[in-house]
Image (cartoon, helix red, strand yellow):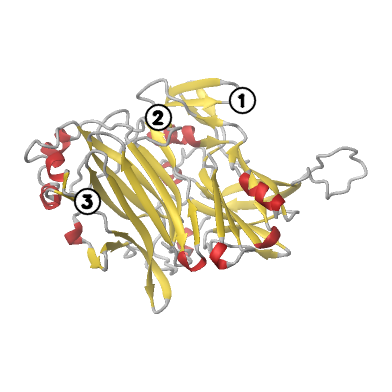
Amino acid sequence: MEKMKRNKLALALTATLGLGAIATNAQAVNIAENGVGDFAYNPYFSVAKAQDQFISIVNTSNKTVAAKIVFRRGTDSIEVRDFIIILSPKDVWSGRISPVIVAGAVTNAKVFTADKSCTVPEKDKWAPEAGGFSVAFDSNIFGNNVVSSSFVSTNVVSGFQSQQIKDIKEGYFTVAVMGVSNIPTDTPNTVAYFAKHVGGTPRNCAAISNNWPTAQTSIQSQFPTAENVLRVSSIMIDAKSNLAMGVPVTTLANAFGGKGQIRLSGNDNPKEPEMDRSVNVFHSDSAKLYSGTADKAERAVSAVLMNDSIYGTYDFTGGTQSSWVVTFPTKRALMTLKPAVQPFKDSIVPLSVSSWDNEEAEEVTKTDVPFSPFFPEITPGKTLPYEVNVINFTVAGAVQNPLASLLGTPVNQLYSNGWMQVGFPDAQPVTVGTSTFGGMPVIGFEYFENGGFSAANNLGFSKVIK
């Protein structure tokens, strides 16, 4: 038991290339090392086991902030719901992703909130339910868990049939700063004034929501800049198993070059934010900072998230189960640039897999190699086909799936506990300015579920890839 506990404390999915990012140019995209920025990726949500995922968005500033949250399904990043949140100074919005259950079965997911912060649309457009309001994910395009020959994702190149899974029980979400207002909260008839809490309740959320589509010029002028002010966190809770697990969030700073992103389209829905094309990327192997400007914002963000390979641990001793979540959050955007989709060669990402045990593979006997470590097992032919992928390990010929994921890829490993390295042999180089980056834009985490304890003492663990 003590050995297993030490292994849990040492978990980490990190990049072999060591790409991280630091800011030297205030207008360049980089990883927000302190977790406070203007854009955040939550790599995974799931209601597949009828669990809930709690979300917290904190405005760390003394200014009023307009933020957009977008939920995407895991197969191909199709958007299934979004809305705007208006956060007054030092405000927090909280909500959760919960299952929609029909006749005892999970058929969809929904967003529920009891939070009083203003949203666009306002709560009168949401469905009232006990303790708050909810809005279900939109499945009108493709239905729930059905095969549709008429719907084909725009990011699919020839040979990959993503329409065979039409599931929105799993996916990821993003949070973007659409704009920051410098207007004092006591200035009448402004968004900052209406959103300000008085006695714990905003002054007038309906005034914001009702005027949002019609007062475009005024609202845009009130939120001219984007600043690094948001901190996003997420916790997955399975009440049936008494299991709570933090989901690591990857936060970017300076993603919008300081420009406000409140841009309204013809149907009055906010368009997607346009990220900046300049980047700062720190390469830890060479101790060099690379800066440059990409041809597309999608490739600039990809360069910041790029890793040659990922590695981490697994453990099946004492009833523990393991999975890895691997998400490619820029894949859909890049695929719309076909045929120039670097770093993706295809919608399906091939893997090279190497695994060791906890003692440098000393369980393997090779008479022609006198010293450890011994050569690892190489597993060819494995692929990650989706935007969100769950790597499931094989134990005694059976594939473990502790997350009950439909987005799983089985991977064989030799040992009951150890570590594994996953590479991306088909990755295409990405050029930003005069710098070239290899690997894949990837985020995610290791998931450990300790089933060796009683339900009352069940434990979950996760560690971030990057």
The residues tagged by marks 3 and 1 sit, at their Cα atoms, a distance apart of 44 Å
Name the residue located 15 percent from the left edge and 50 percent from the top edge.
Answer: 205
The residues tagged by marks 3 and 2 sit, at their Cα atoms, a distance apart of 27 Å
Name the residue located 79 percent from the left edge and 46 percent from the top edge.
Answer: 361
Mark 2 or mark 1, which is nearer the start of the sequence? 2
70 and 232: which is toward the camera: 232
Circle 3: residue type: Thr
Q: Which mark is residue 29?
A: 2
Where residue 109 appears, as percent x and y from the top left, is 37, 64
Mark 1 or mark 3, which is nearer the start of the sequence? 3
Q: Which mark is residue 119?
A: 3
3 and 1 marks in contact (CB < 8 Å): no
Q: Is residue 91 left or right of residue 51?
A: left
Q: Is residue 357 left or right of residue 349?
A: right
228 and 274: which is toward the camera: 228
Q: Which residue is mark 1?
A: 285
Circle 2: residue type: Val
Q: Is residue 94 left or right of residue 448?
A: left
Given the current orientation, which residue lies at the most extreme bottom position? Answer: 103
SS of the residue at dot 3? strand
Q: Is residue 233 left or right of residue 176?
A: right
1 and 2 marks in contact (CB < 8 Å): no
